[in-house]
Image (spheres, rainbow, N blue to C red):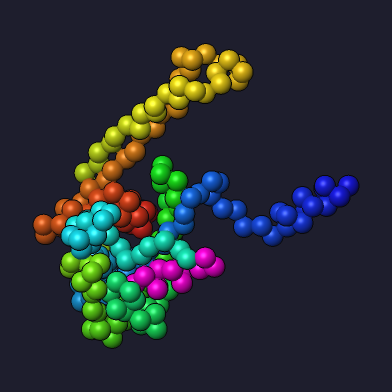
Amino acid sequence: MSELKDLRCRFDGYVPQMLEAQHSYAVLCPFLEQPDGLHLLFEVRAATLRRQPGEVCFPGGMQEPGETPEVCALRETWEELGIVREEIEVLGKSDFLCSHRGFLLQPVLGVVSPAGLAALCPSPAEVAEVFSVPLSFFRRQQPEVYRYDLVPTRPDHFPYQSVGIPETYRWARGTVEVPVWFWEGHAIWGMTARIVRDLIKE
């Protein structure tokens, strides 16, 4: 009976997480109110960064212990773009992404005030440049879509016989879809483009 009680206590009010997620990340999708409608603000990662230099992304990063996605996204936006959290109206969260590399990415939606945009001061250590794209462009222009296969490497030391499967067992494969938009010399692609595609879906 105590085991059942422990089980009830463990899952009472439990918030499900991504199983076996190695890390959790959050990004801010910064909306700007412009004369021609809503824009999305993007940044180009500095060429000196070790990971994904020169790529287009939203401000964000890995959640620190105890941080919510909102707190993480706002902290990273301050660190990368110099926009204080008081100048960002958080609208909520969109659907999260699960990477085949074992991490969870939570987009947070926020509107940057005119004062916040005026105070924009990108960190040169992290950001090479910033630019905005009208949301109407993404709605009007379909992305190019590419796909690549995830092919497993057969584990030689797996206990096939003990598990009861042949050594020729067909391990699961996967396919990753990569949408790409081009805007004034910038390529918006990968997970960033997947977030945008989710934002504009009807």
User: Residue at left 23%, top 69%?
Assistant: 125
Residue at image position (55%, 18%) is 160
Please check the rendered image and state whether residue 184 is part of the magenta-colored stretch, yes or no.
no
Residue in the foreground of this view, choosing between 37 and 165: 165
Principal SS element in the magenta part?
Answer: helix
Q: Position of residue 188 (x, y in %)?
A: 22, 54
Q: Which residues are magenta?
A: 65-77
Front-most of 191 and 162?
162
Q: Is residue 164 visible?
A: yes
Residue lying farthest right? 1
Residue at 44% in and 50% down: 103
Image x and y of residue 105, in percent: 42, 55
Q: Quarter of the image containing the C terminus?
A: bottom left
Reply above or below: 155 against 15: above
**Residue 197 appears in the rendering:** no
Instruction: Name above or below for residue 41 compared with residue 104.
Output: below
Residue 164 in the image: above or below residue 181: above
Q: Position of residue 154 (x, y in %)?
A: 42, 23
97 vs 200, left or right, is right
